[in-house]
C-alpha cells in the first residue's frame, strides 16, 4: 500500500479566522499520512521584539491549534523568524504546537535539541525522520550550547570584482557553506538514517524574490545532504517557486513558495525604504492595500510537495500545483485548467533557467518530478 507525505510552503497566518486559511486544502491535508510545514511566525501572547528582527508578526496562540485541525503533523521552526519575539515567545510557540499534537523540528532550547530529528511511523511500519535547518539567520537566531534557537546551516558570501580596472561595476557573487554546520548536518542525517528508513530534510535557504536563481551554497548543501542519506529535500524562504533537481534519484525542491501566509500592506509600508529595497528583486510586485497577500505576482503560483512511500522507501516524488488569490487562501486547481498549467509551465521555465536537471510529467492530479533523460 502507498502512503503519502505532503510538504507545504511557508506558514504565517495573520487574520481573525485562522481556519479560513485552509478552506481550500484541509481535506487534502487530512487525507495524507504525514503533513509537514515551515513556520514563519510566532504564536504567543506576548514577547519582546529583538532589534535584529525585520518583518515580525506576533500571531495569536490559537494559530497552532488551527494548524493541527488543518492536518499538520510536523512543523519546522528553523527559519529567520524563529526568535523574532525572544525566548519566551519561542518556548510558548513551541508549547502551543506540541499541545495541538504537532511535532516541532529544527529548533530547541539548545543546539542538541535543535538538531534532534522527529520520527514518525507510517501504517506499513516505514519509519520517517525529519530534520530542519536554516541558512537565513539574523544574528544569534541559531541555537548553541546554552541558547535557544534553530539548527543553523550558515553560508558565506564572497564578491569577486570582474573588471578590476572599472571601480563600481557589478561583481560576481560566490557562496559556500559553513564547514562545521555542513559536517553537523551530514552527521545528523547519517544518524537519522540509522533510526529511520526515509530521511526528509527541510532547508530554509536561498535568495528571496529573485526569479529562478539558486545560490551556489544551496547546491553544495543539497549534494552533501543526499550523499549523507537524505531521501528528499524541502526548501523554503524564497516566497516564490524555484526549480527542482534530482540527485542520485532523490528530489530537491529548492522552494515550495508560500502556503498559508498572510501579508497586509498599507501606504506607509509600500513607501518605505526597506520594502522598496526588496521590491526591486522581483519581476513584478505591486502593493494591493485591499489584499491579504502582498507578495510578487509570481507568488500566486505555489505547490505542495508529495512523496509516495511504501515498504521503507520513496516510490514516487512530485507536487500538487496551488494558486493563491488575494484572500491568501491556497487552492488546488484541477488538472487541465489554466491555473494548473501555469504552475507546471513556470516550474519548467525556472528549472531550465537555473540549469537544473528536473523534468515534469503530469500524471492524474500530481506532477511527477524526475531527472531529464
Image (cartoon, rainbow, N blue to C red):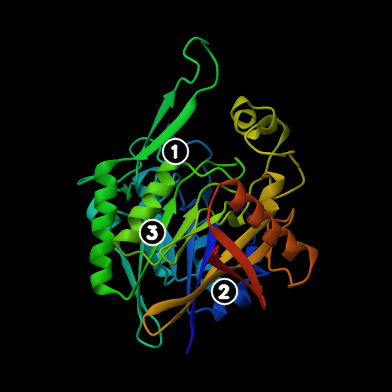
Q: Kindly indicate whether the residue at mark 3 contacts the one at mark 2 (C-beta within 8 angstroms).
A: no
* Residue 94 tag number: 3
Q: Quadrant of the C terminus?
A: bottom right
Q: CA distance from mark 1 to mark 3?
A: 17 Å
Task: Give the secondary structure at mark 2.
Answer: helix
Task: Give the secondary structure at mark 1.
Answer: loop
In this view, the residue farthest toward the right is 338
User: Relative to 30, is 179 on the left or the right?
Assistant: left
Label 1 vs 3, first from the N-terminus: 1
Rendered location of residue 370, percent (x, y):
54, 67
Residue 102 at least partly seen: yes
Q: Residue at x 46, y 20 (%)?
A: 161
Rendered location of residue 265, percent (x, y):
68, 40
Residue 62 at least partly seen: no
**Comparing labels 2 and 3, the label whose residue is closer to the camera:** 2
**Residue wearing tag 2:** 29
Q: Residue at x 66, y 52 (%)?
A: 349
Q: Mark 1: few, some, or many residues within 10 Å (few <14, many ≥20)?
A: some
Q: Mark 2: few, some, or many residues within 10 Å (few <14, many ≥20)?
A: many
Task: Give the secondary structure at mark 3.
Answer: helix
Q: Name the foreground residue: 314 vs 100.
A: 314
User: Relative to 125, is 39 on the left or the right?
Assistant: right
Q: CA distance from mark 2 to mark 1?
A: 33 Å
Q: Name the foreground residue: 237 vs 215.
A: 215
**Residue wearing tag 1:** 49
Q: CA distance from mark 2 to mark 3?
A: 21 Å
Q: Mark 3: few, some, or many residues within 10 Å (few <14, many ≥20)?
A: many
Compared to residue 29, the image places residue 292 above or below, namely above
Amino acid at each position: 500500500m502507498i502512503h503519502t507525505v505532503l510538504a507545504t510552503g511557508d506558514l504565517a497566518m495573520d487574520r481573525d479566522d485562522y481556519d479560513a486559511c485552509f478552506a481550500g486544502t484541509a481535506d487534502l491535508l487530512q487525507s495524507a499520512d504525514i503533513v509537514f510545514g515551515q513556520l514563519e511566525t510566532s504564536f504567543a501572547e506576548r514577547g519582546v521584539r529583538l532589534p535584529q528582527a525585520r518583518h515580525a508578526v506576533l500571531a495569536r496562540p490559537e494559530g497552532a491549534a488551527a494548524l493541527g485541525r488543518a492536518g499538520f503533523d510536523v512543523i519546522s521552526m528553523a527559519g529567520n523568524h524563529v526568535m523574532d519575539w525572544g525566548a519566551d515567545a519561542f518556548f510558548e510557540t513551541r508549547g502551543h504546537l506540541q499541545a495541538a499534537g504537532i511535532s516541532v523540528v529544527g529548533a530547541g532550547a539548545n543546539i542538541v535539541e535543535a538538531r534532534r530529528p522527529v520520527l514518525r511511523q507510517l501504517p506499513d511500519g516505514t519509519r520517517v525522520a525529519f530534520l530542519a535547518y536554516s541558512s537565513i539567520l539574523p544574528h544569534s537566531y541559531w541555537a548553541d550550547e546554552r541558547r535557544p534557537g534553530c539548527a543553523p546551516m550558515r553560508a558565506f558570501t564572497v564578491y569577486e570584482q570582474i573588471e578590476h580596472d572599472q571601480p563600481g561595476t557589478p561583481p560576481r557573487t560566490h557562496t559556500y557553506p559553513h564547514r562545521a554546520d555542513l559536517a553537523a548536518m551530514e552527521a545528523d542525517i547519517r544518524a537519522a538514517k540509522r533510526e529511520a528508513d526515509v530521511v526528509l530534510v527541510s532547508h530554509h535557504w536561498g535568495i528571496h524574490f529573485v526569479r529562478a536563481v539558486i545560490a551556489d551554497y544551496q547546491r553544495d548543501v543539497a549534494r552533501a545532504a543526499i550523499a549523507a542519506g537524505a531521501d528528499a529535500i524541502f526548501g523554503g524562504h524564497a516566497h516564490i517557486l524555484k526549480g527542482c533537481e534530482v540527485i542520485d534519484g532523490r528530489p530537491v525542491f529548492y522552494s515550495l513558495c508560500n502556503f498559508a501566509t498572510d501579508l497586509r500592506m498599507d501606504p506607509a509600508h509600500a513607501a518605505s525604504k526597506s520594502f522598496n529595497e526588496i521590491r526591486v528583486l522581483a519581476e513584478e510586485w505591486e502593493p494591493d492595500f485591499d489584499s491579504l497577500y502582498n507578495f510578487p505576482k509570481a507568488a500566486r503560483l505555489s505547490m505542495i510537495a508529495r512523496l509516495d512511500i511504501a515498504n521503507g522507501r520513496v516510490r514516487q516524488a512530485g507536487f500538487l500545483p496551488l494558486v493563491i488569490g488575494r484572500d491568501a487562501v491556497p487552492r488546488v486547481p484541477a488538472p487541465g485548467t489554466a491555473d494548473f498549467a501555469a504552475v507546471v509551465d513556470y516550474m519548467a521555465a525556472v528549472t531550465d533557467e537555473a540549469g537544473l536537471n528536473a523534468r515534469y510529467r503530469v500524471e492524474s492530479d500530481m506532477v511527477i518530478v524526475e531527472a531529464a533523460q
